[in-house]
Amino acid sequence: MSDPLTWSPIRLGRWFGTTVRVHFLLIAFVVVRLLTSVGSTHGGGRLANLGHTATWLGLLLAALALHELGHAVMASWLEHDQDEVHLWPLGSLVGPSFRLRSGEQFLVALAGPLTSASAFLISAIGLALFANAQVVWWPFGNGTADFGAPSIGKGLLAAPRGAAWMIGWFAYWNWILLLANLIPALPFDGGRVVRSMIGGAAGIASRDSVGAFWGARGCSIILGVAGIIRLMRSWGTDGWTLITIALVIEYMLYVEAQMLEEGGYLDDGVFGYDFSEGYTSLEGGAANVRPYGESALRRWRRRRSELRRERRMAREAAEERRMDEILEKLYREGRAALSDEENRFLVRVSNRLRNRTKHT
């Protein structure tokens, strides 16, 4: 594997045109949790603990699937094909890899948290009305080994693997996904929302923004410090979770900085596949010479402008070649031979060319 954060060995098929894979971090999380439950002395024995843990892990996977389904449905509704999703315990490690205008990027990124929020509210209200139970609001759990189980009455938890217990756990995981993906840093949806808002008039969500970069750095520092404090105060092992999230954000920032420094920043998500890569390459471009005495801010603005121009030229060249291939197929085999993706591509490019003609 070329990068550890792109290793997703399990493929779950395509959802609304989106290929979904299971990242090795999610696999490791599930395996560690199951092994830990077998060695635990809590509850009614090893087999009971294993079944208990396997059940709430299944509810986590259901919440993850629902969260990513929200992204995929929104992308399908906007008639854009989303690239691969790599599931990890808090969502997807790869953002949308298709090229969206800022408003569309904002909607697709926001769809996941809104879906999780809706599932949480529906589950919480349903438990309160029909079971007189309260879901867990504290993100670090209710302080017991059954940390996501809803409470019924004073100091009582719902019976394990009962209807109220399962709904409560499902609500808890949706709440965790919502809170985590509000973090304004990649790979979380909040980071993609911030990038789409910064994109503005550029037409493409800009990922090389100094503000977004240092905002993400601030989030990683806060999360890391909070994790260390929780470990030092013996508030539970969830401090390691906060530190892990901080390290993932830092690694994202490291790769982003490396790509910007090399002048080859891809526009398709931090670890995604560049749409233009299959058709053209920018490796043969001439090296840019920095003017003498240029300030850091002016150098950054010049580099960003050059990268945008290169990305636009690469995208247009790729679309022209793709259009030629589809038109040749249309001529040989007829309209019925075109796939749904090819038909959407024709409509999208034709509309853009028509609008460009009107404004010239």
Image (spheres, rainbow, N blue to C red):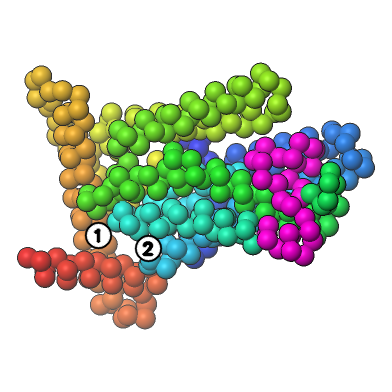
Does 14 appear in magenta? no
Dividing the picture into quarters, in which one does residue 104 lie? bottom left
**Which amino acid, by three-letter code, is at mark 2?**
His
**Which amino acid, by three-letter code, is at mark 1?**
Glu
- Residue under label 1, please give it: 319
Q: Left of 93 or right of it: where is 272? A: left
Can residue 267 be seen here? The reply is: no
Q: Which quarter of the rendering shows the C terminus?
A: bottom left
Q: Secondary structure at mark 1?
A: helix
Q: Residue at x 28, y 28 (%)?
A: 261
Q: Left of 102 or right of it: where is 70? A: right
In percent of width and height, residue 290 lies at 13, 25
Neighbourhood count class around disc 1 (C-alpha, 10 Å): few under 14, some 14–19, many 20 upward = some
Say the numbered circle drawn on residue 80: 2
Which of these two is toward me, 66 or 121?
A: 121
Q: Residue at x 72, y 36 (%)?
A: 32
Can residue 319 be seen here? The reply is: yes
Dividing the picture into quarters, in which one does residue 233 lie? top right
Q: Nearer the viewer, mark 2 or mark 1?
A: 2
Which residue occupies the extreme right position in the image?
Answer: 44
Residue 252 vertical placement versus 321 (above, below): above
Which of these two is toward me, 90 or 47?
A: 90
Which of these two is toward me, 139 or 38?
A: 139
The magenta-colored residue range is 123-150
Q: Residue at x 20, y 28 (%)?
A: 297
In percent of width and height, residue 52 lies at 82, 47
Q: Residue at x 71, y 22 (%)?
A: 234
Query: Cα distance, mark 2 to mark 1?
Result: 14 Å
In the rendered structure, are the residues bearing label 2 and label 1 in contact, judged by CB atoms less than 8 Å apart? no
